[in-house]
Image (spheres, rainbow, N blue to C red):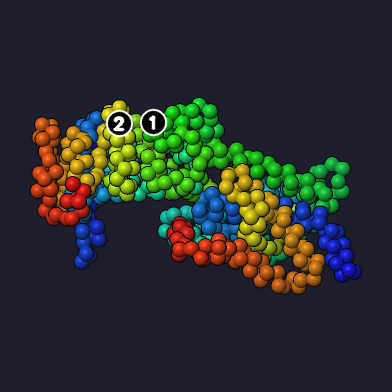
Amino acid sequence: MLEIRSARKVFYKGQPDEKVALDGLSLSLATGEFGIVIGSNGAGKSSMLNAISGALILDSGQILINGADVTGMPVHKRAAKLARVFQDPMRGTAASMTVAENMLLADLRSSKRTLRQGLNATRLASYRERLAILGLGLENRLDTRVDLLSGGQRQSLSLIMAVGGSPDLLLLDEHTAALDPRTAEIVMQATVRAVDALKLTTLMVTHNMQHAVDYGSRVIMLDAGRVRLEVAGEEKARVTVVDLIGHFSVKTDRMLLAS
Amino acid sequence: MGFIEGVLTSFVAIIPVTLAQSLILAFVVLGIMIPFRMLNFPDLTSEGAFPLGGCVCGVLLAAGASPVIGIVAALVAGFAAGCCTAFIHLRFRIHTLLAGILMMTMLYSINLRIMGKSNLSVFGSPTVFDWVPFARPGFPASKIVVAGLLALVAFVLLYMFFRTEKGTAVRAVGANPDMAEAQGINVWAATIGGVGLASAFSASSGALMVQSQGFADVNMGLGILINGLAALMIGEAVVGKQTVWRQLLAPFAGAVIYYQLVSFCLAAGMPPPDLKLATGLFVLAMLALPSLKRSRGPAPAREAIRE
């Protein structure tokens, strides 16, 4: 479970272009819950995700994962508890390394790396099996350098890497936004299957209102660095795209197009 | 015909000497390759770490220490120097190249302090090259055997290391530091350790060189970096860099080929003062080649180098 307690972060403090990114944001996500985060640009979605992953250190407030306070923990230590898929397929994988090596890196995310040989037959077999689920043929390209894969394949690989080892918390940062509609659908379906099968506690940021309506058990709308609206349970099941857009303070063409 | 024969005769005559020298200097090339290719951390520390190793070893030999102790001490000193460079880069967000320049400049003074003078003769002190059976001490054959064996050991150990879980993690830091961090890898530890290891190799090369030539000099590192880079470029052109195996072999193959080429040019009558200009132009050509090839296509993306 994830708990954010009155998180506050101000950029350029004391300067004319001071910007409050997180303004006392509080949020709690129960174990196994699939939260969808929406909000216009600059609402604080990325700042919140960065704060959870450790890339952004809070000015004040607390972040707890499964009850453990991780507020001051560096990124690489938090990685034992959480996994993240970035919007940019390039960021989540090591381009000059092979598919199998990338899988190995993710495999060791929460364990101590030893001086034993990294890739062995057992591991390769399990990677082949896990990649076969996608149906993209990646299981036959374990020795291919990742920079030779398409954006969709890379993003699918990132997803498989992230859900491996059942992290306590899965962060999805607009992870289908950079893909073409068909590939985005494949990646989204794979995401939903994995989240359901492994009962992962998940937080997904998206600009796609249809996704917000179709998936997840709770919709969280951010505005100006705080939670503006939460829709869960029965209400979540009945909510429509038009309802959600109605709550935006700033309406953009992008949202209408996405719906 | 007489000219060509003369050139070939004098070239062939010094092949063993050049081979011995190139096997010793292959460790500097290795010390340049590891940060540059494995960690994406272009590093200039070797220009200071090479004489640092030489000075440390020279002082210890002059004091009567065993040649092995000299090399081990050089390794440790080089490791510390490399760690400092990496730390300067990470902590103060200074560009890797500037961090390396700072370090090598400071090392010059440190090297002078260590030796107390700019030049120290250790001629006649025991060296690791004396221990080869059936070879006359000081003869190139013994140097080739010792340096070659050390190179082989370094190659095998590094190859094994980069295939381990830890080694894969170090390579990930070079490939994509953000991703590596998100996968739980301590980027600081990997970078500091990796650059330290590389400088340790450069310093051990300096120590071997001092034992080979019989003296230590604070200026012995002058130009070593550009020579090493040229050797690395040749090695990568010949054996490639697509796999870990090839990438690790490239410094050794490159060093051997490069120094034979240099010796051939000198035998063919190239004036020694022109050597650095020629080497520099060669490295420039090798680095420029990919962008020249691309020039007909769309504008090339800028190479992402850590800042």
B238 displayed left or right of A170: right
What residue is disc 2 on?
A193
Q: Foreground residue, B232 or A179?
A: A179
State the residue in front, B13 or A135: A135
Q: Are marks 1 and 2 in contact (CB under 8 Å)?
A: yes
Residue at position x 45%, y 61% in the image: B301
Question: Mark 1 = which residue?
Answer: A133
| Residue B88 vertical placement versus B71 (above, below) | below
Q: Nearer the viewer, residue B132 or A134?
A: A134
Q: Where is residue A225 in the image (x, y as percent from the top left)?
A: 18, 51
| Observer-nearest of B79 and B241 | B241
Secondary structure of the residue carrying tag 2 is: helix
Number of numbered labels in the structure image: 2
The residue located at (77%, 54%) in the rendering is: B19
Mark 1–mark 2 distance (CA, rounded to whole Å): 10 Å
Q: Is residue B65 visible?
A: yes
State which chain disc 2 sits on.
A
The residue positioned 90% from the left and 69% from the top of the image is B2
* Percent x, y of residue A14: 21, 63
Residue sitting at the far front: A182
Q: Is mark 1 on a helix, strand or loop?
A: loop
Task: Check the image and report above or below for A158 versus B212.
Answer: above
Give the chain letter at badge 1.
A
- Residue sitting at x 84%, y 52%: B139
Q: Label 2 amino acid? A: Arg
Question: Left of B252 or right of it: where is B87?
Answer: left
- In the rendered image of this protein, does residue B285 appear above or below residue B214? below
Q: Is residue A60 toward the left or the right of residue A242 in the image?
A: right
Figure quadrant of the N terminus of chain A: top left
Q: Residues within 10 Å of mark 2 (few under 14, many from 20)?
A: few
